[in-house]
Image (cartoon, grey):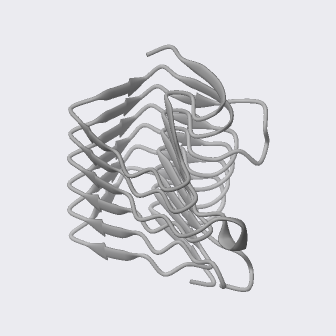
């Protein structure tokens, strides 16, 4: 709680980090770049169960991502990430860029099971969740999202609840309601996906 860092306000998993994190809270943390609560990158695939990501914030970098969590495979400069989040909550997180609750970018493939995304805010797209990749669709972020809820999230641009760009995530029994986007896709927005 109340931690501050350039990358990963609460925690960073960098390069082959596969920690198991149980019953933990990542709350009120600040990052200047990515991952207010946690930053996962470069072939790291931690397992998080029953964790909370509340009121984390990303500041300074207008291209920053992931108010609650940022997962960044890195494309050709890193490697794919396969983290798993089960029974986790993402509430009241804020980002200047994409993914108020969570951002998955460039070969990031999180599995989200029974997670809740509520009242998160993105200054760009994906108030609850953003899955983004390069324009060539070479490094997609194909999240596997099951039994999750996205409620009352806000994005200034696209995808109030969920924003997908150049990626192919899977959604099963997902509830998306009461989200707001400034331009397109109040609940969900897909672009070249």
Quadrant housing the N terminus: top left
Q: Residue furthest top?
A: 2
The residue that appears at 41% across and 65% down in the rendered structure is: 82
Q: Left of 135 or right of it: where is 88?
A: left
Give 67 or 184, whichever is nearer the viewer. Answer: 67
Compared to residue 1, the image places residue 186 above or below, namely: below
Q: Residue furthest front?
A: 16
Q: In terms of image quadrants, where is residue 19? A: top left
Quadrant housing the C terminus: bottom right
Q: In terms of image quadrants, where is residue 26? A: top left
Compared to residue 75, the image places residue 175 above or below, namely: above
Give 105 or 193, whichever is nearer the viewer. Answer: 105
Residue 45 is situated, as x and y percent measured from the top left of the image, at 40, 58
Residue 171 is situated, as x and y percent measured from the top left of the image, at 32, 73
Give 174 or 38, whichever is nearer the viewer. Answer: 38
Q: Left of 188 or right of it: where is 126?
A: right
Give 6 or 17, whichever is nearer the viewer. Answer: 17
Compared to residue 177, the image places residue 3 above or below, namely: above
The residue that appears at 27% across and 43% down in the rendered structure is: 88
The residue that appears at 71% across and 44% down in the rendered structure is: 64
Residue 50 is situated, as x and y percent measured from the top left of the image, at 21, 39
The residue that appears at 66% across and 64% down in the rendered structure is: 74
Residue 13 is situated, as x and y percent measured from the top left of the image, at 50, 44
Q: In terms of image quadrants, where is residue 114? A: bottom left
Q: How many labels does the image show?
A: 0
Q: Left of 97 or right of it: where is 23?
A: left
């Amino acid at each position: 709680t109340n931690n501050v860092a350039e990358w990963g306000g609460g925690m960073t998993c960098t390069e082959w980090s596969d920690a198991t994190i149980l019953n933990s809270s990542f709350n009120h943390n600040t990052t200047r770049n990515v991952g207010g609560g946690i930053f996962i990158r470069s072939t790291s695939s931690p397992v998080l169960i029953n964790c909370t990501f509340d009121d984390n914030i990303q500041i300074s970098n207008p291209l920053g991502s992931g108010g609650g969590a940022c997962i960044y495979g890195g494309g050709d400069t890193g490697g794919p990430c396969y983290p798993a989040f089960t029974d986790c909550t993402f509430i009241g997180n804020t980002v200047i860029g994409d993914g108020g609750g969570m951002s998955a970018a460039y070969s990031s493939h999180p599995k989200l099971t029974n997670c809740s995304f509520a009242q998160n805010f993105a200054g760009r797209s994906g108030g609850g969740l953003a899955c983004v990749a390069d324009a060539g669709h070479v490094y997609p972020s194909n999240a596997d999202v099951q039994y999750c809820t996205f409620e009352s999230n806000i994005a200034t641009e696209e995808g109030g609840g969920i924003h997908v760009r150049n990626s192919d995530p899977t959604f099963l029994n997902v509830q998306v309601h009461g989200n707001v986007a400034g331009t397109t896709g109040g609940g969900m927005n897909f672009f070249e996906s």
